[in-house]
Amino acid sequence: MALDIQVSEFVAELVIDNPPVNALDSAGWHDFAAKVAELGKRADVRCIVIRAEGRGFQAGVDIKELAANASLITEVNRGCYDTFAAIYDCPVPVISAVHGFCIGGGIGIAGASDIVVASEDATFALPEIDRGALGAATHLMRLFGMQKTRRMLYTGESIDAAEALRLGGVESVVPREKLRDAALELAHTIASKSPKAVRLAKQSLNGIELLDVKTSYRFEQGFTLELYTSPDSQESRDAFVEKRDVDFRDDGRDDGA
């Protein structure tokens, strides 16, 4: 099962378990959004921890699904938008416990969360520029600020947990074997507080943010769709699926200049 839910002592764990890299297809993203929304309505849930099994936290969308049917990009976009919005709007705090790779959609999940706890082996990246796409820069900027986000988005470079902590994008960094316990300990501390006070606190914090994360991401998705339907994007996807270097030699295509 790609997404598993466990609830104990007012804390819900939403576990991503979809080998090999926890990427999700369009249906998976819609399911993710629905599960977060459902948990936010439950009286026995006062805090949510999103974590993952396997080699890393989350590797974004299922590129192979889109390679087989490019028309599903609109469903993928909607599923991602709904998931990140559900996390951001969730009435109770959401903690992302990140280990290994956190890329693409993983950045959207973490960046929409209230708090991020990372393991020492965690890395963060938006490699979409090498996959013929864009997306989740809104959430990356929420984590790491403008300068680092621009560099990461333009280059596809990753940063490690220590740099993420230095930039203030994660709340704490712990050894890999202690990640789940650290996230759950924090979640249980939050869950021990007045449920009404915590829910109102989250509403107030969302209300005072300088950027509307959902509107910003929706604006960004328009450019994602424009790029995805371009020849450069097709070349990037083909190269990724075929495991070869991309070829962006000038062939007279319009590059927007």
Image (cartoon, rainbow, N blue to C red):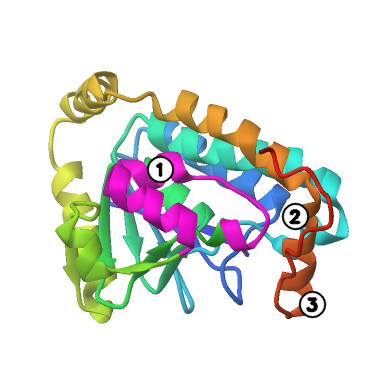
Task: Kindly state the secondary structure of the residue where label 3 is placed.
Answer: helix
Q: Label 1 belongs to which residue? A: 139
Task: Kindly state the secondary structure of the residue where label 2 is placed.
Answer: helix
Q: Where is residue 175 in the image (x, y as percent from the top left)?
A: 21, 78
Task: Kindly state the secondary structure of the residue where label 1 is placed.
Answer: helix
Q: Nearer the viewer, residue 79 or 251?
A: 251
Instruction: Give the foreground label among 3 and 1.
Output: 3
Given the image, on which type of amino acid does mark 3 rest? Glu
* Disc 1 crowd, CA 10 A, few/some/many (<14, 14-19, 20+): many
Q: Give the range drawn in magenta.
A: 129-156
Q: Label 3 belongs to which residue? A: 242
The residue at the point 41 percent across, 30 percent down is 213
The magenta stretch spans residue 6:
no
Residue 40 visible here: yes
In primary-sequence order, the first of circles 2 and 3 is 2
Examine the rendered structure and indicate whether residue 1 appears above or below residue 116. Answer: below
